Amino acid sequence: MRNKVFVVTGGNSGIGRVTATEIAKMGAQVIIVCRNEQKGKAVQEDINALTGLNNCDLFLCDFSSHASIKKFAKAIRVKYNHIDVLVNNAGVIIGDRQVNEDGMEMMFATNHLGYFLVTHYLLDLLKASESGR
């Protein structure tokens, strides 16, 4: 797994955190993508301390926001020239109907459009890998 780059959205809790941790333990570079910087940094520090490899990186992104997704995609390109695996894990469950800044229903924007846009904006980085997934 060395020299492999994994992006795990929603990597600060639940399945995303476990996935990021286990991949990092195998020696891959793991990028966790979270909305909350404080929670994300805490998990990043935990993973780096656990592995001793300093192989967990953190990027911030709100998957309900097209502008945030574009900003994230630009930021990741500054540091990485390829992605081997993109794990689209982030998601929300919202009880009351909410609308995002783009006028879209929040849960639909986050759980459906967000993944589509992230994959769309990172597709060339996945293709730049010999075996991007």
Image (cartoon, rainbow, N blue to C red):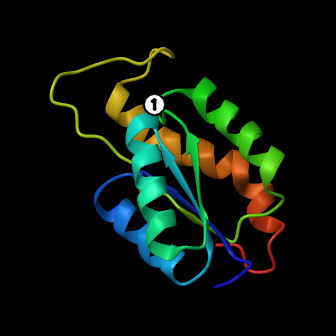
Q: Residue at x 71, y 73 (%)?
A: 132
The quadrant of the picture occupied by the N terminus is bottom right
The secondary element bearing badge 1 is classed as loop
Residue 92, image x, y percentages:
30, 41
Residue 124, image x, y percentages:
80, 57
Q: Residue at x 54, y 73 (%)?
A: 52
Q: Residue at x 45, y 30 (%)?
A: 64
Res. 56 in view? yes
Residue furthest toward the left?
Answer: 95
Residue 6 versus residue 95 in the image, above or below: below
Quadrant for residue 110, please give it: top left
Question: Badge 1: how crowded within 10 Å, few (<14), some, or many (20+)?
Answer: many
Res. 11 in view? no
The quadrant of the picture occupied by the C terminus is bottom right
Circle 1 is placed at which residue position? 64
| 72 to the left or right of 93 | right
Residue 126 versus residue 4 in the image, above or below: above
Choose between 37 and 9: the one closer to the eye: 37
Residue 115, image x, y percentages:
52, 48
Choose between 63 and 1: the one closer to the eye: 1
Q: Amino acid at mark 1?
A: Ser
| 89 to the left or right of 92 | right
Choose between 65 and 9: the one closer to the eye: 9
